[in-house]
Amino acid sequence: MLKKIAVCLGTLALLATTVASAAPGQGRGKPPQEAFDACIDKVEGDSVQIETPHGDTLEAICKEMEDGLVGVPADRPERR
C-alpha cells in the first residue's frame, strides 16, 4: 500500500515539474549575442541581417527588449 502511494506521489511530482517547465514565457533564454551585435548603432524598427553560427542569414528588425536593442527575426510571430 505504501509503495503504491509513493509511486502516485512520484508520478504527480514528475507531472507537476513537466507542466511548470512548459508554462508560457518560462525557460526562454537570452537572445544570442549576434542579435544584439546586429543592432549596434541602430534604432528600434531598423532592418538588419543576422548571421547565425551555422552560416545562415536572417532578416530581422531591431526591437527594444529587457536586455536592450536586439534583432528579432522579421518572420517571427508576435507574442500575445
Image (cartoon, rainbow, N blue to C red):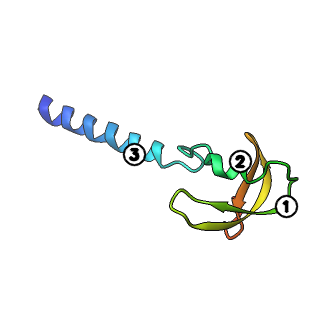
Residue at the spot 79% in from the left edge and 54% down from the top edge: 63
Q: Secondary structure at mark 3?
A: helix
User: Disc number at residue 36?
Assistant: 2
Q: CA distance from mark 3 to mark 1?
A: 38 Å
Asked if the residues shown at circle 1 and circle 2 are in contact, with their CB atoms under 8 angstroms apart, the answer is no
The disc label shown at residue 2, or none: none
Asked whether, in this view, residue 43 is left or right of residue 7, the answer is right
Q: Residue at x 23, y 39 (%)?
A: 8
- In the rendered image, residue 12, in percent from the top left (x then y), is placed at 32, 40
For the image shown, how many numbered marks are present on the structure?
3
Q: Quadrant of the N terminus?
A: top left
Q: CA distance from mark 1 to mark 2?
A: 13 Å
Amino acid found under the numbered disc labelled 1: Asp
> Mark 2: which amino acid?
Phe
The mark that comes first in sequence, 1 or 2, is: 2
Amino acid type, callout 3 = Thr
